[in-house]
Amino acid sequence: RRGLVHEDCRKLAEAAAEYEKALALPFRPPDLPDRDEEEVELEFFIPRIYPASPAGRSAFQVQLLGRLDRLYSALGQSEKAFGSTLRRYEADPRILEHLDSVERIAERFKLAGKEAEFQGWGRKRLEDVKHREALCWVLGDHAGAARAIAERPEEDPQVRPPLQPWKERFRKAGKAK
């Protein structure tokens, strides 16, 4: 809350310091809404993550790290901004399962001349990511991406990525080589 107040008052460095403090504290779920607020949420079918769950902790960390990334960028502290970006992806590895997210972060690191740093970080994360085809693809391991796609379970169509976009990517990559 202090970080939000500092942010509202345009005290960005102080806000970043408060967010860092919040991340360093042991996780404690936030206060739940009052009963009347809960009823309003149910009326609008707003899905909520149970704050005490691991997913709740992860969502909280991702939110704070996203704010830190933005603040450090605004303060011109690019090293800290890149660090908070990587920490955000570590807090929720599921983000790395989406090709567009991985491509955006890889491009950001490339433009800053930090492509090698991202490549090293990404290679260390390959075993941590359940569905690693996007990370393999961006790291240039097209054979690894193909293996990851092939290893996905067929019985659950919601888990398996649509194959047509991947086929197109492989065709384009084959032409580029």
Image (cartoon, rainbow, N blue to C red):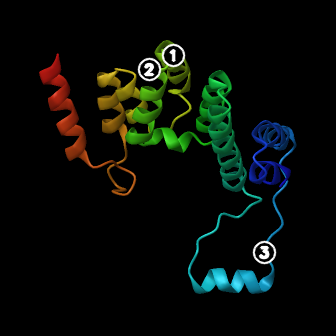
Tags 2 and 1 in contact by the CB under 8 Å rule?
Answer: yes
The secondary structure type at the circle numbered 3 is loop
Q: Is residue 121 visible?
A: yes
Q: Residue at image x 58%, y 74%?
A: 46
Q: Which residue is mark 1?
A: 114
12 vs 24, left or right, is: left
Q: Which residue is mark 3?
A: 33
Foreground pick, 174 / 149: 174
Amino acid type at image mark 3: Pro
Q: Position of residue 116 (x, y in %)?
A: 49, 12
Q: Residue at image x 83%, y 55%?
A: 1
Q: What numbered label is drawn on residue 43?
A: none
Relative height, residue 87 to residue 61 (above, below): above
Quadrant of the image occupied by residue 16: top right
The secondary structure type at the circle numbered 1 is loop
Relative height, residue 172 to residue 63 (above, below): above
Q: Residues within 10 Å of mark 3 (few under 14, many from 20)?
A: few
Q: Which residue is mark 2?
A: 110
